[in-house]
Structure formats: structure tokens, C-alpha cells
Image: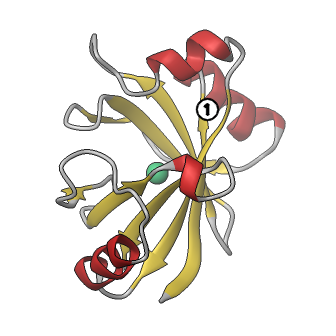
Amino acid sequence: MLGRLNHVAIAVPELASAAATYRDTLGAAVTAPQALPEHGVTVVFVDLGNTKVELLEPHGANSPIAAFLEKNPAGGMHHVCYEVDDIIAARDRLRAAGARILGDGEPKIGAHGKPVLFLHPKDFSGTLVELEQA
Ligand code: CO
């Protein structure tokens, strides 16, 4: 079921400076910022060839990463995103196995224009997992 690692996401308090660090200090290719109001974040992607790093900054008042940044004011690793071929089949299989799907359980459209779901960290070794239909 599980495919490639699509990205590792890092929550940051200030996207412009984090993007500049990856672009200028680390010499990486960084995309322009993209606001995703439905997800409560603004993102940039760092292209690493084999995978990506997603830098996340809160967008709006009720951002799902606000509490994380309160606990981790300097930022930190927030989630990993794995690719799946069929997100509905993956969801149903995980549900049948007892895993908790966050939100209403219906996929939302993610930063790549593809359906995504998030899985409860307590069911996956303390790590928030995003699934993206490849
Ligand atoms: Co993500």
C-alpha cells in the first residue's frame, strides 16, 4: 500500500527566513510560498531530487500548526508524507485496522493538487502521517 516518501514537513515560525536558509545557506531549490487556507498553512517546497522538504508557516487564526509552534517555538519536524495509489482504499484499510483518520475522514486537496489525509500520531509511533494519492 505504502509508496514513496513524498516529503518531510517542518513547521517554522517565519517562512521567509526558513526558506532563505534552505535557498542561500544550503543552496537548495525552493518554490515560491503558497497559501493553503483550507489547511491553515502557507508552504514552500525544497526539492531534493529524491524527495522534498515542506516548510510550513501558520496561515490564519486557527492554524493546525499553531499549538505545535507554541511547544516548539524554533520550529521542528511536523509530519511525514507517504504516497499511496488509492487514498480511499488506503483509508478504508487503515480504518479496518483500527487506525484513526484525522478530521472528517474525507480527503482534502493538498499542496500538490492531490487528495491527502492525515493519520493520528498515536497510531504511528508518535509521528503525524500524511497520505497523498500519487
Ligand atoms: Co505535508
Residue at 68 percent across and 17 percent down: it is: 72
Quadrant of the image occupied by residue 106: bottom left
- Left or right of 74? Residue 45 is left
Residue sitting at 34 percent across and 77 percent down? 96
What's the residue at 50%, 16% (across, down)? 67
Q: What residue does disc 1 label?
A: 19
Q: Which of 86 and 44 is in front in this view?
A: 86
Quarter assignment of residue 63: top left
Q: Residue furthest right?
A: 25
Compared across the picture, whether 11 is left or right of 117 comes to right
Q: How crowded is mark 1: few (under 14 residues within 10 Å), some or many (20 or more)?
A: many
- Provide residue 61's location: percent of width, then percent of height: 28, 10
Question: Relative to residue 45, is residue 32 depicted above or below?
Answer: above
Residue 81, visible in the rendered structure: yes
| Dot 1 amino acid type | Ala
Q: Residue at x 42, y 68 (%)?
A: 98
| SS at mark 1 in the image | helix
Task: Tell me residue 68's x, y (percent).
Answer: 56, 22
Q: In which quarter of the image is the C terminus?
A: bottom left
Is 24 placed above or below 133 here? above
Where residue 127 appears, as percent x and y from the top left, is 63, 50
Q: Which of 127 and 110 is in front in this view?
A: 127
> Is 130 rendered above or below residue 38?
below
Q: Please say whether residue 30 is visible from this viewpoint.
A: no
**20 or 62: nearer the eye?**
62
